[in-house]
Image (spheres, grey):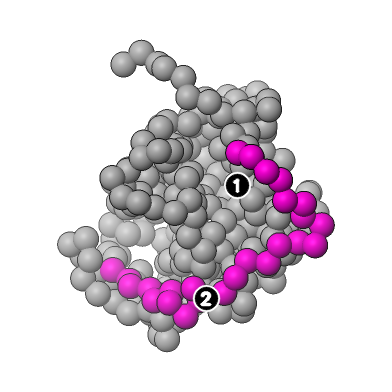
Amino acid sequence: MNILNPKYPIYIITYKRWDSRRTERALEEMKLPYYLVVDGEDIPKYEAVIDKNLCTILELDQQYREDFDEFVKSDRTQKSDGPARNFVWDHAEKNYGKDSKHWILDDNIGGFARLNRNQKLLCKSPSFFAAMEDFMDRYENLAIVGPNYRFFASQNAKLPPYVKNTRINSCFLIRNDIPYRWRGRYNTDNDLILRVLKDGWCTVQFNAFLQNKAGTQTVKGGLNDELYQKEGTYLMSKCLQDMHPDVVKVVERFGHPHHLIDYSSFKKRKLKLKDSYVRKTGINEYGMKMIEVPK
């Protein structure tokens, strides 16, 4: 089988990271077209460094910041990623249809990998995204999927290819037609996943496919400088606990206050195959193969 390109649009939301461009570079190495959502004042700085053959810049409509539900009171002087995420969702629905899906990626993902036979292998094939799309398209009750973080998937452990009804972070494939939008000053991703699960949908986090996400507060720019460095992690975790007190509590993790989410009540929910899906035999590698590269 030939290499497959993803069929759903890919969006990157970014804020004042025209120097690092971690996710953009990763997609450009894959030769994948993508949308880049930025503030209008920063467009010239991004235009100077993007690959114009692959990147289409979208200016964030500032009305999305005015209308955004932060859930907590603030003076709104610091930025949240939620308005840009809602802008992306509306753009995808308007331009690709309510019955389609869209990818939305953070701007600090330094590449992608496959976990295969206890090896985490750098993956530069666009089939990385196409394979996850194909899996999601089989099910009628699957709302959101995405790859696990590379540092959470040990190659020395026995891991399943995917885990259902759990968190998805930083890299999402989302159905356009589910009745939600992003909200919250902090933890927009975890809040969305919990609302989806509480309403009876399913999610899938892949271990077979991984993202090389930078650790929280380790990349200059973005919300790191504008929000988390100034307000810390306690408020971020407390906000999620206030949103979902039945399944979230604030604990000490990774050397700082952090949220702990209990997904146990969702684990028994099963994925439902579409009636139109026809099972196939054999292993489909989607055109991906291992190659030896110089050290």
**Which residue is found at the position 21% from the left and 71% from the top?**
252
Question: Percent x, y for residue 274?
Answer: 76, 61
Q: Specify the label residue 132 is tagged with.
A: 1
Question: Percent x, y for residue 97?
Answer: 80, 54
Residue 86 in sight from this viewpoint:
no
Please state if 40 lies on the left or on the right of 291 as rendered. right
Q: Badge 2 is on which residue?
A: 268
**Which residue is found at the position 47% from the left and 66% from the top?**
166
Residue mark closest to the camera, 1 vs 2: 2
- Quick one: SS at disc 1? helix
Taking 94 as reference, is 56 above or below it? Answer: above
**Which residue is found at the position 53% from the left and 26% from the top?**
289
Which quadrant of the figure has residue 141? bottom right
Please state if 183 lies on the left or on the right of 121 as rendered. right
Taking 89 as reference, is 13 above or below it? Answer: above
Tag 2: residue type?
A: Lys
Name the image quarter holding the N terminus: top right
Residue positioned most to the left: 255
Tag 1: residue type?
A: Met
Which quadrant of the figure has residue 99? bottom right
Name the image quarter holding the C terminus: top left
Q: Specify the label residue 161 is tagged with.
A: none
Residue positioned most to the top: 294
Mark 1 nearby-residue class (10 Å; few <14, some 14–19, many ≥20): many
Question: Percent x, y for residue 276?
Answer: 82, 57
Which segment is the magenta one? 258-283
